[in-house]
Amino acid sequence: MDHEQHMRAAIDEARAAAGAGEVPVGCVIVAAGGSIIGRGRNRRERDADPTAHAEVLAIREAAKAVGGWRLVDVTLYVTQEPCLMCAGAIVNARVPRVVFGCDNPKAGAVRTLYRLLEDARLNHRCEVTGGVLASECAAELTRFFEALRNQ
């Protein structure tokens, strides 16, 4: 799989989120053949839903695409390290591979604060690759929050 190509698709989702006034986090879920079967971007403000994170929305779309809740032969790409809620959704959906962009120092549950996706106590673990296009992913977040502070 071309991690950078798919991460760029996730960055496009993050930019669309920022354009809608949402925190710029984007996610795509890619099937084994390379096609995107799920897309998500943060929509917490728009949907007035605290669970409307990019990963959760992409998982929901991918589950509909495959006709079931188990996403067993996919790779999830997300611009920022998932939080606890999203990491839990990834485990519950049985996603085998996660690729993320930048670290999430305040809420990261994959490598920064917790290592939930690799926790041997859980019934599912994921292969994790971090740091793919990290600078670009972090720059989207920085621009968004700088603009917010300057309003």
Image: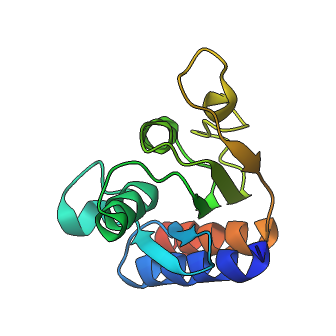
Residue 151 in sight in this render: no
Q: Is residue 116 left or right of residue 65?
A: right
Residue at the (52%, 42%) spot, across then down:
83
Residue 72 percent coordinates (x, y): 52, 51
Quarter of the figure with residue 40: bottom left
Quarter of the image containing the N terminus? bottom right
Residue 150 in sight in this render: yes
- Give the camera-side residue of 138 and 41: 41
Quarter of the image containing the C terminus? bottom left
Residue 136 percent coordinates (x, y): 75, 75
Residue 74 percent coordinates (x, y): 57, 61
- Give the camera-side residue of 100 and 123: 123
Q: Residue furthest top?
A: 121
Residue at the (19%, 64%) spot, across then down:
47
Location of residue 123 with respect to 90 vertically, above or below: above
Residue at the (62%, 69%) spot, across then down:
32
Residue at the (65%, 53%) spot, across then down:
98
- Give the camera-side residue of 51 and 75: 75
Quarter of the figure with residue 127: top right
User: Colour mode?
Assistant: rainbow
Residue 55 percent coordinates (x, y): 45, 57
